[in-house]
Image (cartoon, grey):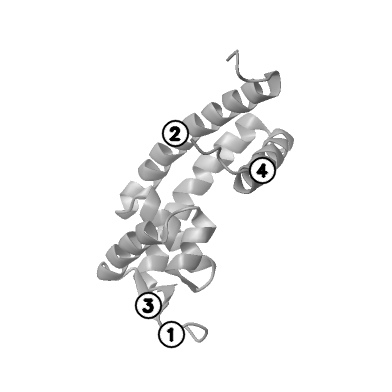
Amino acid sequence: MNPDRTPPGDAFATFAISVLRLAGHLQNAGDALAKPAGQTSARWQVLAAADHAPMSVADAGRTLGMTRQGVQRVADLLAKDGLIAYRRNPVHQRAKLMVLTNAGKAALDRIKERQAVWANALGATLGGKELEEATKTVIAALQAVEKQSVPET
């Protein structure tokens, strides 16, 4: 225990470290799942965001928890490769909407097929009810972190 932290503070620190470790493993798994389709986790995330609904780069960044600049870099590469296209945005002249092309849909479908097999196996191992409870905890932590400011130095 850190002498400056309370037991709940220690519990949160352990939780945060575990989530960060999990995120690293999920990133690596995502890269492996996306690789046969010629993609990476980052490209997969942007493709999936564009598939969910036509959205601007800034909207995708907010949805994915990524910077607008990071999403823009990936989106421009996807557009260059013909996997997404930029369309006029009726609510914002400068913020174009990303939409999947047929090639983008095909790449995303290929990744989704592989991800389904992987997710089904992990879901069976971990159990649906346990995963639902874990998800509630992660969402609650996410909401708390979004509201809690980091102390200034």
- Spatial separation of the CA atoms under disc 2 and disc 4: 24 Å
In this rendering, the answer to whether 124 lies above or below 107 is above
The answer to which of marks 2 and 4 sits earlier in the sequence is 2
Q: Residues within 10 Å of mark 3 (few under 14, many from 20)?
A: some
Q: Which mark is residue 25?
A: 2
Asked whether disc 3 touches disc 1, contact meaning CB atoms under 8 Å apart, the reply is: no
Q: Position of residue 151 (x, y in %)?
A: 55, 37
- For badge 2, the amino acid type reads His
**100 or 120, which lies in front?**
100
Q: Element under label 2?
A: helix
Q: Which corner quadrant of the image does residue 129 belong to?
A: top right
Q: Mark 4 points at which residue?
A: 144
- For badge 1, the amino acid type reads Gln
The answer to which of marks 1 and 4 sits earlier in the sequence is 1
Foreground tag (1 vs 2): 1
Q: Position of residue 83 (x, y in %)?
A: 34, 68
- Spatial separation of the CA atoms under disc 1 and disc 4: 34 Å
- For badge 3, the amino acid type reads Tyr
- Spatial separation of the CA atoms under disc 1 and disc 2: 39 Å
Q: Element under label 3?
A: strand
Q: Position of residue 85 (x, y in %)?
A: 36, 75
Q: Which mark is residue 93?
A: 1
Q: Name the residue under label 3.
A: 86
